[in-house]
Each structure stands twice: as structure tokens, then as C-alpha cells.
Amino acid sequence: MRTQTKRLHPALRMQAAWRLLEPGAKGTVASVMKRYDMTERELKSACQDFLNQNFKKDRSWNPAWDDELVIHHPVDTAVMVDIGNGAEKGSDIDLMFDPDFDSVNGMLHVRWTSDDVLALCEGIPYRVLEILRDSKPGDELYQEAIEMADSQIFKMMCSAYGIDADSVLLKALNITKADI
């Protein structure tokens, strides 16, 4: 247990909180405290700040992010590590130029329009198929894509765009030669 308090970067505080709060999170209080070198009190405070959207607002804060329709998306931990280490991955560099990316808090603050939601829903079936194509049966990512393709929400999205979800899933399984 740590006795001396050191200030943790706001983005790391938000990542720590998200590791506990994310639906289906695998982190435990003890594991998150150890990973981020935090006390239980600090972790509880970070979770409260996350839930209450108490973000550090410095000179780079965009006042538009305070709009009640803005949704605050935590940036994936691996992406934030890559950014911190200066990795030259295309997706990380694109994120750095996104005007809604908040590097201080490790968040992407997005005001979703109806068109954005429709585009997302329309793109999910294609993204699932890309994942199935680019991964191997038995891989964790492949399994997640199969679960998504077999979900009710996936079937509803496909139906909304005139796609036969069951046919797509069967063809994808056949093409990838999955033994499921």
C-alpha cells in the first residue's frame, strides 16, 4: 500500500475508473489499484469524477463538450498508451487531429446526431464481416464478432437495411471455414 500521494495524470485516472465501470469490466478494485498505483480512496474519487463527468478543464477544454447532448467516450487504454509512447500508428495519429479528442482526460467528446447514429448502425454489419474476414476461428476477436452477428441488435440493424442477418452469418462461417 502506498503511503505517499503522487498525482496521477487525469487521463490515467479516467482509464482507471473506466476499468471498473465499463460494462463487462474484468478489472477488480485490487487489480486497478495495483495497475495505476492508486489508493482505494483515490480510485473511488476517480470513479465518482467519471460518473459525474468532472473532467479536468484546462485551456484546451472545448466549452462545446459541456453540452448535455455530448457523450464522453473513454479512449481505449492501449490507444492512450500508444499516444503516450509516441507510437506512429495511423489510427492514433488520426485521433490526435480529431477536434473532439481530449488528451488531458483521455476522452472523445462527441455530440451524436441522428445521421451519425444511422451511419454507425449501417456500418456495424460490414465491420463484423471485416473482423470475421481478418481474424481466425478461435481467436477472441473472431468469437466476439460471431456473438455480435448472432445478437438481436445485429439482426435488427441488418433488417433495417434490408440485409438477411442469418444468411450473412451462415455465409461468413462457411467462407471462414469455422468449426462452430
Image: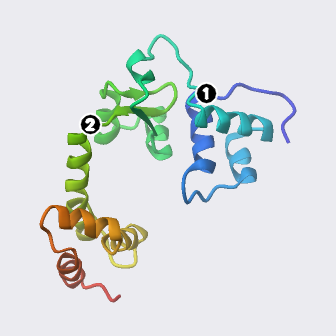
Q: Residue at x 68, y 41 (%)?
A: 36
- Residue 89 in sight: no
| Residue 138 visible in the shown view | yes
Q: Which color scheme is applied?
A: rainbow
For label 2, the residue is 113
Amino acid of disc 1: His
Q: Is residue 128 above or below residue 122?
A: below
Residue 7 lies, in percent from the top left, at 70, 25
From the top left corner, tell me how far across and down residue 52 is, in percent: 60, 32
Foreground residue, 24 or 32?
24
Residue 102: image quadrant is: top left
Residue 93 pos. (x, y %): 31, 33
Q: Nearer the viewer, mark 1 or mark 2?
A: 2
Looking at the rendered structure, the kind of residue marked 2 is Thr
14 vs 2, left or right, is left
Toward the top, the furthest residue is 59
Which residue has dot 1 on it?
9
Q: Is residue 121 left or right of residue 70?
A: left
In-image side of 15 versus 68 (left or right): right
